[in-house]
Image (tube, rainbow, N blue to C red):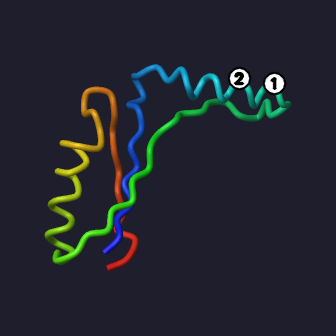
Amino acid sequence: MKVRILVSLKESVLDPQGQTVRNALHTLGYHQVKDVRQGKVFELELEGLNRQDAEKIIPEISDRVLANPIIEKFSWEIMEA
């Protein structure tokens, strides 16, 4: 089973890299871009788990290893069973 986990900074955390990208886009004439937030994408391939077990372990993995819960949030989706 494949899982995609998206990790991004919490809204209350400043994102200097995102602001740098936004400024670069404005310099290139893309003034429609109001804000940019950077993040990370992880794709995991799990085996030996049913969907219910995967739904239990994915948030645990994300919270303990992939994201810093103090400044980051995460969301996830199962891509294929």
Say which residue appears at 16% left-offset and 72% top-offset: 52
What label sits on residue 18 in the rendered view? none
What count of labels does the image hold?
A: 2
- Residue hosting label 1: 27
Residue 28 percent location from the top left of the image: 83, 30
Q: Is residue 6 above or below residue 11?
A: below
Say which residue appears at 32% left-offset and 27% top-offset: 71
Q: Is residue 15 above or below residue 68?
A: above
In the image, 17: left or right of 9? right
In the image, 46: left or right of 31? left
Q: State the CA–CA distance, disc 1 to disc 2.
A: 6 Å
> Secondary structure under badge 2?
helix
In the image, 74: left or right of 14? left
Density class for disc 2 (Cα within 10 Å; few <14, some 14-19, many ≥20) is some
Image quarter where the C terminus lies is: bottom left
Image quarter where the N terminus lies is: bottom left
Say which residue appears at 76% left-offset and 34% top-offset: 32
Density class for disc 1 (Cα within 10 Å; few <14, some 14-19, many ≥20) is few
Determine which quarter of the picture holds residue 23: top right
At label 1, the amino acid type is Thr
What label sits on residue 23 in the rendered view? 2
Residue 75 percent location from the top left of the image: 35, 51
At label 2, the amino acid type is Asn
Residue 4 percent location from the top left of the image: 39, 60
Say which residue appears at 17% left-offset and 75% top-offset: 49
Q: Check whether the beta carbons of the residues at disc 1 and disc 2 lie within 8 A of each other.
A: yes
In the image, 31: left or right of 13? right
> Secondary structure under badge 1?
helix
Which residue is farthest right? 29
Residue 21 percent location from the top left of the image: 65, 29
